[in-house]
Image (cartoon, rainbow, N blue to C red):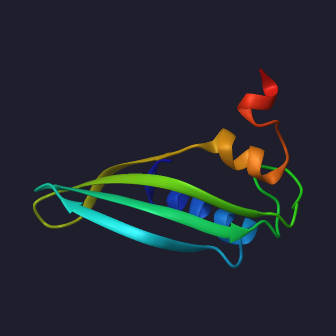
Amino acid sequence: IKGKKQFREFVEAWAKAFPDGKIVKPQYTDAGDTVIAQFTVEGTNDGHFLGLPATKRRVSAAFCEIVRYDPNGHAVSGSIYYDQYGILAQLGHVKPLAAAA
């Protein structure tokens, strides 16, 4: 994701795929010019996700977001980590890893 526009598109795509989606159990760590957010995302897949059809299944997935800020408090970089395979398995688009082995 590069820039505000692409970040907005990323967030809007998630909102369309999981319209009842919510963030639960957020934890924030202040590390000076960096903030680390750890949280769980929960929601029902009622829209296309990564070009795949909606499954109406519930998803619960852990996320970690790391954002670095400049001295004026503006975000200058960020990273988001999550288990996309795990989400796709919960949605039924791929086999769970144990079943795939």
Instruction: State the residue in front, 3 or 59.
Output: 59
- Visible residue check, residue 12: no
Q: Is residue 36 left or right of residue 9?
A: left
Q: State which quarter of the image contains the C terminus.
A: top right
| Residue 69 position by quadrant | bottom left
Which residue is at 28% across, 60% downward? 75
Instruction: State the residue in front, 45 or 47.
Output: 45
Which residue is at 39% across, 54% downward? 65
Q: Is residue 23 left or right of residue 89?
A: left
Which residue is at 50% across, 47% downward? 1
Residue 20 percent location from the top left of the image: 69, 79
Which residue is at 73% across, 70% downward? 16
- Please determine whether, in this image, residue 100 is positioned above or below residue 14: above
Residue 44 percent location from the top left of the image: 75, 70
- Visible residue check, residue 68: yes
Q: How many marks?
A: 0
Residue 9 percent location from the top left of the image: 61, 62
| Residue 53 position by quadrant | bottom right
